[in-house]
Image: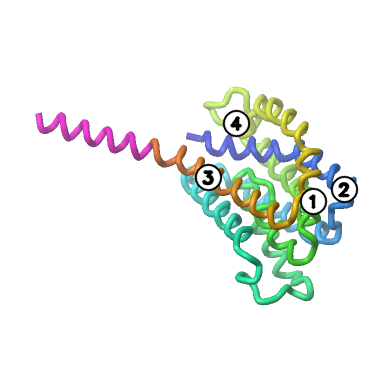
Amino acid sequence: PEMPKIAMATSLALVIPTTFASAQAHAARRGIDWYLWSLLAPGIVAGAIFTALFAAKLNNEFLILLFIALVLWTAWKLMVPASRQHSQTPKCLPVMLITLKSVLGGALSSLLGLGVGWFTVPMMAWFTAMPKAIGTATALALPMAIAGTATYLMMQAPGECNQCAGFVALPVVAAIGLSAVLTVPFGAWAAHIMPVAVLKRVFAIFLIIVAGYLAYKTYAPAKFMHFVQETLAQSHTSH
């Protein structure tokens, strides 16, 4: 019953090696806005720690449904032209609003085992170039992932995971983390050479595919099996 939470905590732990390597690659290309990073990082870390403490008490299906909803919302924000979302670009940084969004976003990212790009990239794209927004989001994910993972590691490991430290499946982190790090330089290179419009659409399509796959794996088989069981029960009753 705790597998969704194990998956989310492990996913968050995987963010650490991938974002560390990616942030280095973006920094080498001067692709990080350190002012925006310093503005957003404290709230994101605070939100990550706060939610990780309560993750074990939350309903699994609620977490998955929330994840799907947020991913689809982010995809929509990236696909819809900016002119249809806002009449004009903000001329100054709304510090209080950005801080509030960073706390809430960091909380949800830690809770669902995500990076922070799903909410920081659309927000920062108003104040900096798209490639730099992506690079800054990568750098912001590192402190969030460290804080959230540390909190998950301090929790009692669930009984169904013998190789877990807290809620983190260490063998999975080791296996996937290495392969993910090896592909990071290509991702950073692509973010700086692809046209912004193409980059947004590629990211949005990827998010939609992830949401659709997760929705199918979570809900479709369960509903189908429930339908089969009800049909068999009715057939048995009629005979």
- Residue on which the image places disc 2: 27
- Residue on which the image places disc 4: 157
Q: CB atoms at circles 2 and 1 under 8 Å apart?
A: yes
Q: Amino acid at mark 2?
A: Ala
Q: Nearer the viewer, mark 1 or mark 3?
A: 1
Task: Give above or below for 221 relative to 98.
Answer: above
Q: Residue at x 60, y 63 (%)?
A: 80
For residue 199, side relative to residue 3 (left or right): right
- Residue on which the image places disc 1: 135
Q: Amino acid at mark 4?
A: Ala
- Residue on which the image places disc 3: 57
Report, in whole angstroms, how far the alpha carbon at label 4 lies from the one at label 1.
Answer: 34 Å
Report, in whole angstroms, how far the alpha carbon at label 2 lies from the one at label 1.
Answer: 8 Å
Q: Amino acid at mark 3?
A: Lys
Q: Earlier in the sequence, mark 4 or mark 2?
A: 2
**What kind of element bears circle 1?**
helix
Residue 37: give x, y in percent of width and height.
Answer: 81, 57
